[in-house]
Image (tube, rainbow, N blue to C red):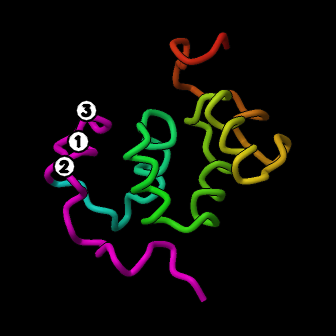
């Protein structure tokens, strides 16, 4: 059985420094994977660059990323649509298409 995260990255280690710009509102030095997996996946799916997405895909299984895409109401519809296509998730299985998010995403979509 595959773990949520790859064994190559310990849950208690600090995240790589190149991810810091994507977590501007928190004390990045204190952020760890343990207990914050969904938050980290959402943030990197929404704002991550190519390097951040590569890290995400080597750290988390496609199933773990897919669960976040299905359940998240924080992802913009554009982001959810992209990852739904990448992960072969139908729109009707994604919460952001059925339940409006309380977060504004005006810079990424026309919602």
* Membership of 74 in magenta stretch: no
The mark closer to the camera, 1 or 3, is 1
Q: Nearer the viewer, mark 2 or mark 3?
A: 2
Contact check, label 2 and label 1, Cβ < 8 Å: yes
**Secondary structure of the residue carrying numbered label 3:** loop
In the picture provided, is 35 more to the left or to the right than 45? Answer: left
User: Which residue is pictured at 60% across the width and 29% down the height?
Assistant: 76
Residue position for label 1: 20
Q: Which residues are magenta?
A: 1-29
The quarter of the rendered structure image containing the C terminus is top right
- Going 49% across and 44% down the picture, which residue do you hit? 42
2 or 3: tag closer to the N-terminus: 2
Which is more toward the observer, 61 or 42? 61
* Residue 82 placement (x, y as % from top left): 68, 37
- Relative to residue 1, is residue 63 depicted above or below? above
Whole-angstrom CA distance, mark 2 to mark 1, is 5 Å
Looking at the picture, tell me which residue is in the foreground, 18 or 69: 18
Q: Is residue 28 magenta?
A: yes
Residue 56: assigned label? none
- Residue name at image x 25 percent, y 32 percent: 25
Return the x and y of residue 1 as percentages of the image width and height. 60, 89
Number of numbered markers: 3
Which residue is under mark 2? 17
Disc 2 residue crowd, few under 14, some 14–19, many 20+, Cα 10 Å: few
Left or right: 97 in relation to 26: right
List x then y, in percent, for residue 60.
49, 65
Give the SS element for disc 2.
helix
Q: Residue at x 43, y 76 (%)?
A: 6
Q: Which mark is residue 25?
A: 3
């Amino acid at each position: 059985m595959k773990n949520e995260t790859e064994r190559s990255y310990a849950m208690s280690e600090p995240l790589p420094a190149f991810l810091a710009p994507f977590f501007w509102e928190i004390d990045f030095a204190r952020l760890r994977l343990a207990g914050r997996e969904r938050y980290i996946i959402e943030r990197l799916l929404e704002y991550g660059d190519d390097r951040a997405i590569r890290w995400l895909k080597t750290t988390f299984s496609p199933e773990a990323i897919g669960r976040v895409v299905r359940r998240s109401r924080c992802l913009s519809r554009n982001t959810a649509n992209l990852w739904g296509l990448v992960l072969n998730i139908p729109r009707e299985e994604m919460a952001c298409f059925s339940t409006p998010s309380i977060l504004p995403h005006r810079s990424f979509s026309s919602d």
